Amino acid sequence: MSLVKLAIEGISYSQTQNGAYALILNEVDGDRKLPIVIGAFEAQSIAVSLEKELRPPRPLTHDLFKNFADRFDIVVKQVIIHKLVDGVFYSSLICERDRIEEIIDARTSDAIALALRFNAPIFTYKGILDKAGILIKSNLKVDDKMNDEDNNDPLSDFEPFDDNETSTTVMNPYDSYSTDDLKDLMEKAINNEDYEKAANIRDEITNRES
């Protein structure tokens, strides 16, 4: 399965969900974007690394990991976002020490924070980008209606990318979900007090069962 290189486009704060941020990754050789919802601490850590002039007085957790790795000659060679399940992205750190390569499981937000500190490239598989890659409309704010990372549903608030559709065509973001998956998503939305989203999912379930 072919890998697609990604670059960090930016971080946007959610005005509707306290403490939630959207990390936007951009396809290097294409137009699709991959939005990933992350927590406040991880967003701060990524922002500090992106802004080279920002120097925290004490090392952040990801800085500590980098210092520890440097001390023991461990290098993070690349980060791969390798799986997407129920809207949650899974990533791996490809590390090397003494010419021995190791693969370490990591949350995507942590993996990207470390990739920045090691100047390591970020990749995902083409199949994941085909499934979750989007074209964000000019009138759509990327910081709207974000959930926390563990309940991330990147298809719920964005227009999915489809090579056979124009960017002005609005598709049903729940077409790829089964009814049982939608019920789980609705329960998560209710637990997160995102009642507008829960209502939309409820309407979709009602339409299917009618």
Image (cartoon, rainbow, N blue to C red):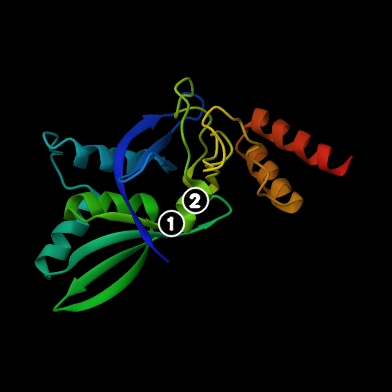
Q: Is residue 191 above or below residue 110?
A: above
Horizontal arrangement in the rendering, residue 164 relative to residue 54 (left or right) = right
Q: Secondary structure at mark 2?
A: helix
Q: Residue furthest front?
A: 164
Mark 1, secondary structure of its residue = helix
Amino acid tagged 2: Asp
Circle 1: residue type: Lys
* Relative to 158, 52 lies left or right: left
Quadrant occupied by the C terminus = top right
Residue at image location 73% in from the left, 47% down from the top: 183
Q: Is residue 47 rendered to the left or right of residue 204?
A: left
Q: Residue at x 52, y 38 (%)?
A: 147
Q: Position of residue 181 (x, y in %)?
A: 69, 51
- Up-down relation of residue 27 to residue 22 (above or below): below
In the rendered image, which residue does mark 1 sit on? 126
Q: Which residue is nearer to you in this view: 101 or 167?
A: 167
Residue 130 is marked as 2
Residue 56 point in image, percent of width and height? 15, 39
Q: Nearer the viewer, residue 82 or 63?
A: 82
Q: Position of residue 77 (x, y in %)?
A: 21, 64
